[in-house]
Image (cartoon, helix red, strand yellow):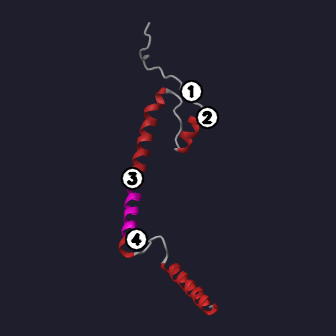
Amino acid sequence: KNKGGKEGGASKPIKHNAETFRLFDQLKLDAPITTDDVPACLEKLEAKLEHYKVKVKEWEEKRDEMKRKLIEEGIRPDVDPEDKAEKAEEEKAEEEKAEEEK
């Protein structure tokens, strides 16, 4: 009798609850159904982790660039210059209207 030891290559089923399936679904991965599925699932999870680390790094660089532009140039890169011009014209028209009413 081999209690607590690993059985010779026998794959055991893994019981999941609805939350576990939902989490794997969010990651667009299939939940491992047996213990034999775990190593392949771990590889996929690690690949996803690396992918998200790259995305975070890109976002941080973009964020730093936007911060730099805002500080140095007073320009918000997410604002279209044409929209900025239209807004300035509208503000000027409002100011002129306010002056006329005085």
Which is more N-terminal, label 4 or label 3? 3
Q: Residue at x 48, y 79 (%)?
A: 81
Residue interval drawn in magenta: 57-68
- Amino acid type indicated by mark 1: Lys
Q: Distance from label 4 to label 2 (Cα)? A: 46 Å
Do the residues under discs 4 and 2 have CB atoms within 8 angstroms? no
Q: How many angstroms separate mark 4 from mark 1 (CA)? A: 52 Å
Q: CA distance from mark 2 to mark 1?
A: 10 Å
**Residue 50 on image: x %, y %:** 39, 47
The kind of secondary structure element at disc 3 is: helix
Please say if 80 is above or below 20: below
Residue in the picture at 41% in, 58% down: 59
Q: Give the tally of numbered discs.
A: 4
Q: Main secondary structure of the magenta part?
A: helix
What number is the disc on residue 15?
1
Badge 3, how many Cα within 10 Å: few under 14, some, many 20+?
few
- On screen, residue 3 above or below 94: above
Crowding near the residue tagged with mark 4, few <14, some 14–19, many ≥20 C-alpha atoms within 10 Å: few
Q: Which mark is residue 18?
A: 2
Q: Residue lying at the far right in this picture: please name it.
A: 101
Please identify, in this view, whether the residue under mark 4 or under mark 2 is nearer the observer.
Answer: 4
Q: Amino acid at mark 2?
A: Ala
Q: Which residue in the protein does label 4 denote?
A: 70
